[in-house]
Image (tube, grey):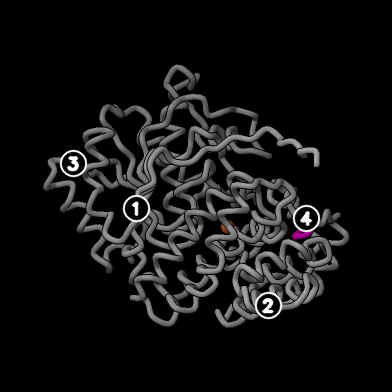
């Protein structure tokens, strides 16, 4: 049989991925290898409650490395928050600086945005230093709404340390940034933005609030599925997803029930990492496409929005994804028997049940969406994620789908 040929592709992942229980203890060695001081971008209260923030300080102090907290991230990154940090920092020396971003996906995305924009926006590029419109400048770099500016300088070295098992932001080349004024959520994107080091210690997830665990875990699972069935098909992505999804599906209920289950946290952290690698190399689908617009309209956190939309996305794509859904079902349950049709149906049912067991609503009205905003939601869900959806939809079709789950 003739070989089918292979489309051009690239592989961009962190130069170093350190994965394992207890690896957080290596953080000061990595900082010392990349620089001499830390600009810390950190998550919110849970870092204090788990002692992670104190431990980071102690480890760096013992190694003679000064740590300066640059930003405490308590919400998904906004244009104004990123602009404000840049305004405060752009005239300061970056000699020896290593950006350490420790927290959930929002924190890591903030760190990625800061690390790349601070080197790209050199003083020579900022025309009038007294009257810079920082927000306009940041927007200029965003895809879809910007001015086509590109990240073209090596960012500050970034060590990404996730404390949730969810977004996979430690392995992706984009940072999602929202603007409430202009009502969008768009990405800053460049291969240069991939963190230099992804330090993944599943132990840091112990103590994560259970609601965050549910939603971030379902985000990772949604990313794995959408990347697997995406219109852009990459063998590397599909092989990785087939390998990690079964363990993630089994482990999410376990970490929800028992927040100290070591093996289950390891499986979830690995699934999150792989989901980031997967989405960066193939793409996503309609759950993520709608989730961005839903976040803008209702303020629904990303993971929750994806979880709400996953069952609908699976049902919509079922007709063209029978073989792929059957493959995923057989990977999860090799002894289930049945033909592709039976297995695909079982997969949709299994995932819908998992979302329900996590207590996630199936209704958009429960998220505060107004009925008269469904048309807007449908029209604004067609960004880069939707381009990967197996079933090609038009806004009218999507509006009917959204009506059904209102
Ligand atoms: Fe996601």
Identify the residue position indicated by label 3 in the image: 66
Image-based side of 253 in relation to 66, left or right: right
Mark 3 and mark 4 lie on one chain; the one further toward the N terminus is 3
Q: Which of marks 1 and 4 is in front?
A: 4
Image-based side of 287 in relation to 200, left or right: right
Q: Over which residues does the magenta segment extend?
A: 376-380
Q: Does the residue labelled 2 lie within 8 Å of ligand 1?
A: no
Dot 4 alpha-carbon crowd within 10 angstroms: few under 14, some 14 to 19, many 20 or more: many
Q: Does the residue labelled 1 lie within 8 Å of ligand 1?
A: no
The quadrant in which residue 94 appears is top left
Q: Of all residues shown, which one is farthest toward the top?
A: 124
Image-based side of 58 in relation to 381, left or right: left
Residue 71 visible from this viewpoint: no
Proximity of marks 3 and 2: CB atoms separated by less than 8 Å: no
Secondary structure under badge 3? loop
Residue 357 visible from this viewpoint: yes
Identify the residue position indicated by label 2 in the image: 362
Mark 4 and mark 2 lie on one chain; the one further toward the N terminus is 2
Mark 1 and mark 4 lie on one chain; the one further toward the N terminus is 1
The quadrant in which residue 23 appears is bottom left
Proximity of marks 1 and 2: CB atoms separated by less than 8 Å: no
Whole-Å distance between the Cαs marked 4 and 2?
22 Å
Residue at horizontal 70%, vertical 59%?
290
């Amino acid at each position: 049989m003739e070989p089918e040929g292979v489309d051009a592709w690239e592989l961009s992942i962190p130069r170093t991925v350190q994965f394992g229980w207890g690896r957080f203890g290596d953080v000061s060695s990595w900082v010392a290898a990349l620089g001499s001081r830390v600009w810390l971008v950190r998550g919110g209260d849970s870092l204090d409650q788990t002692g992670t923030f104190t431990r980071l300080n102690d480890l760096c102090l013992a190694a003679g490395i000064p740590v300066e907290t640059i930003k405490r991230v308590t919400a998904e990154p906004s244009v104004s928050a990123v602009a404000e940090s840049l305004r405060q920092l752009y005239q300061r020396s970056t000699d020896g600086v290593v950006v350490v971003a420790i927290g959930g996906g929002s924190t890591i995305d903030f760190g990625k945005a800061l690390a790349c924009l601070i080197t790209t926006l050199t003083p020579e590029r900022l025309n009038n230093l007294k009257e810079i419109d920082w927000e306009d400048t940041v927007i200029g770099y965003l895809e879809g709404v910007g001015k086509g500016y590109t990240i073209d300088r090596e960012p500050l070295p970034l060590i990404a340390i996730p404390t949730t098992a969810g977004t996979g932001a430690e392995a992706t080349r984009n940072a999602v940034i929202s603007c409430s004024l202009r009502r969008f959520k768009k990405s800053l994107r460049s291969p240069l933005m991939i963190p230099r080091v992804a330090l993944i210690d599943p132990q840091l997830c112990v103590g994560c609030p259970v609601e965050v665990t549910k939603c971030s875990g379902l985000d990772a699972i949604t990313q794995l599925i959408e990347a697997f069935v995406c219109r852009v098909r990459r063998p590397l992505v599909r092989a990785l997803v087939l390998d990690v999804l079964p363990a993630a599906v089994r482990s999410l209920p376990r970490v929800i029930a028992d927040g100290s289950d070591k093996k289950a946290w390891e499986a979830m952290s690995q699934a999150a990492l792989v989901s980031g690698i997967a989405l960066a190399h193939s793409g996503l689908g309609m759950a993520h496409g709608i989730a961005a617009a839903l976040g803008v309209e209702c303020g629904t956190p990303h993971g929750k929005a994806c979880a709400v939309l996953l069952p609908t996305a699976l049902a919509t794509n079922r007709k063209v994804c029978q073989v792929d859904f059957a493959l995923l079902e057989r990977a999860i349950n090799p002894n289930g028997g049945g033909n592709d049709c039976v297995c695909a149906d079982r997969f949709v049912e299994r995932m819908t049940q998992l979302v329900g067991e996590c207590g996630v609503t199936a209704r958009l009205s429960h998220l505060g969406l107004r009925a008269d905003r469904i048309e807007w939601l449908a029209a604004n869900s067609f960004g880069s994620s939707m381009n990967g959806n197996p079933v090609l939809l038009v806004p009218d079709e999507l509006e009917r789908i959204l009506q059904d789950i209102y």
